[in-house]
Image (spheres, coloured by chain):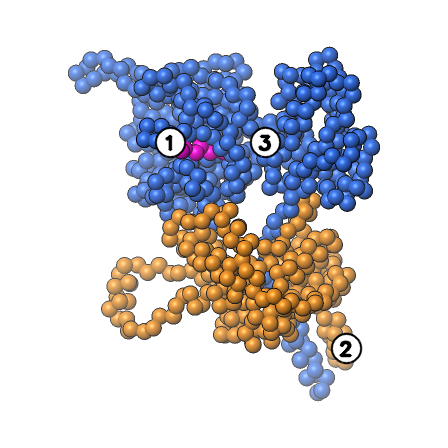
Chain colours: A blue, B orange
Amino acid sequence: MKYIISLFVLIFSLHSFSQEAVIAVGEAEQEKDKLVIDSSETHNLSNTQKVLANELLDILRNNFIFYKHKFNTVLYNKTAKSYTTENLAKWKEDGIQYFVASSITSTTQGIEARFRLWNVREGKVILNESVTVSNTDLRPKAHDISDKLYRAMTGKPSIFKSKIVFISDRTTKSRDIEKELYIMDFDGRRVEKLTTFNSIVLSPSISPDNTKILFSVIEDKAALSSRNKKKMIKNINLKMYDLLTKKMTTISSKPGLNSGATYSRDPNIIYLTLTQSGNADIYEMNLTTTRMRKVTSHFAEDVDPSITQDGSMMTFLSNRAGRAHIYTMDPSQTEKDVKRISFVGKFNATPRFSPDGKEIVFSSWVDNGFDLYKIGANGQNLVRLTKDFGSNEDPVFSPDGEFIVFTSKRVINSRKAVQDLYIMNREGEVLGQLTQNFGKCFSPQFTNILD
Amino acid sequence: MLLLLSAVLVTKFLMGPSTKRSLEIEIIQSSVRVDVVGMPKFTVQELREMQKNAAPAEPDAKPVEVAKAAEAPKEEPKEDVIKEGDLVIEKEKKQADFTNLLSSYSSQKVKKKESPRAARPTNTVVSGKGNQIIDNLILEGNKVSAGSALVGDITSETSSEFSAYVQAMPEKVRVHWKLPSYLMNQNLKCRIKVYLNANGNLIKTEIVESSGVEEFDSRALRAIKDAAPFPAPSKDVGTRLATYGIILGFPI
């Protein structure tokens, strides 16, 4: 009997002991890796070549400052010949995780730079790369080598080779505002003008293979007046610009609005807003067949679609609840699984998915201007990103999901305001200004990562 | 036969939690749904700064005894943290329709409504001034929590108090929970049992499930040590924490 009682006690104890609660602490914050991009070993360089070599290293160092939430990029002058003679013990002692050593020699066109990337903790070289650089290709070559270094350290692509397409009104000369399309490097350098409509260009979108840009433009269109007389009216038409052939094509010029177009994963399928039925709705369009399919069908205005990379979800703006709010839906069928995401905000605008489709960044009117917010695609975890930083709009995630580029407007006086592009990390830490003295800038869009 | 079975059970019991037994585990996260009533006032950066500046609760930490990871059941099979059939209660405010609302008003007796704030866990247990500020900010709408699962039989006042106390612990630990890049996204997981005394100081920590990577486990242990001391628990909660401890999951 004594044994039976003790058995019962033990079974009971084991049961209560085995049913234990676990309190989830959550995901850890990542510590920054200490990165050294050391001064180069140079061999018989002319003064011009020395300048080129220094500029190359400066671009590399500057690039990694964009990822300062991941890397603590430090200067390190403790050894003059780190390329030929590594000092792993010392680097380890100094808490360095990654060490970039380089050797630069003279070529007829410019310089040849050889890079060696050390994973100090593991004590091994994880990248050996050589590149020839001249004055004409310095920046793209520097971005390319930066991307290779970043990939070797993180296993992921960077934004260093990405470009930003945007709109600027800098060519406006009279009262008639002109907004044209431009493209530049991710860091705001090497700006190139793409269009000359002498009109207003709107809402660009880049094809998945980075070869084409969709955008809208306000154009004159012949129409009949109520007295059956010909007159010219303004119409917002959808155009496509081929970056390879430099050719322009009109995609849609239905009466009214043909705008807000965005590419899906399939380069033949786009989503755009049309007002041909008198009400703004989002349509899917096949670029090859020009067949249209209604995606939203509501008496309210539905505009500004953004599609996840896998094409399974669309976010858009609608006033179906009375005010402009953010919604998500499955774009494969009309009005399928429409879900309201935002419930607060006086006026929400430009919802844009993160590359992984888990978050939506948008702008919302607060007090006397717009600020940026981020919300989970399931409608949870609403957080604020900007405050006391001008009026901020048009946010867009970088293709690696680490950054958000946006426009910020500052009123100088009652007649003048500036609006430039800025870049922040995904947590809202502003990293810098991308455009300056380049007119008012609008609607930034990143090119895609291709490899 | 009975004696043999009993002996096996005694052996298993004496070996305690470090043996290779299968833990039935429930995840407890925040149990309170916070409804957003307006756009967040503070940015992520501002909230981070406030969290960094949160005042420590009590200064007198005592030395910590740490059980070795080697004792933990490393080869224990991974289990779903919430099993099929587990009771999952989601505390959400039920929306009354207009007709029911009117009838409920007409038949309603005036009674003192229990303040929802009184039931909030963090208000009762987090003593740091900074944490209180953050708590209030979250109430103002900087976060919509999952309204997530509270599992099991926690119904008595003591159990609720215990639950409230332990749910507030991750807030303190998370600030110190950091990993180097090479340990991120490795899908590693470890679980550490924490024993606290009546003052909220660590008595000891015990790795009940190792990640298999020593650095990961030691980082989790360091986060707990750096977070200590925790707020002083009530007598009942303190007794339970000193006797049975509570398991913290890194990350779950």
User: Could you say where residue B114 lies in the image, as x and y percent from the top left?
Assistant: 38, 70
Mark 3 Cα-neighbour bin, 10 Å: few <14, some 14–19, many ≥20:
many
- Comparing marks 1 and 2, which lies closer to the viewer? 1
- Is A107 a magenta residue? no
**Quadrant of the image occupied by residue B139:** bottom left
Q: CA distance from mark 1 to mark 2?
A: 84 Å
Q: Does residue B90 appear in the picture of this structure? A: no
In screen coordinates, is A168 left or right of A231? Answer: right
User: Could you say where residue A41 lies in the image, as x and y percent from the top left?
Assistant: 77, 26
Residue at horizontal 52%, vertical 74%? B158
Mark 2 Cα-neighbour bin, 10 Å: few <14, some 14–19, many ≥20:
some
Do pointers 1 and 3 mark residues of a single chain?
yes
Do pointers 2 and 3 mark residues of a single chain?
no
User: Could you say where residue A225 lies in the image, as x and y percent from the top left?
Assistant: 20, 17
Numbered tag placed on residue A412 in the rendering: 1
Three-letter code for the amino acid on which mark 2 is drawn = Ala
Tell me which chain the residue with mark 2 is part of: B
Q: Does residue A14 appear in the picture of this structure? A: yes
Numbered tag placed on residue A159 in the rendering: 3
Numbered tag placed on residue B7 in the rendering: 2
Against A60, residue B200 (above or below) is below
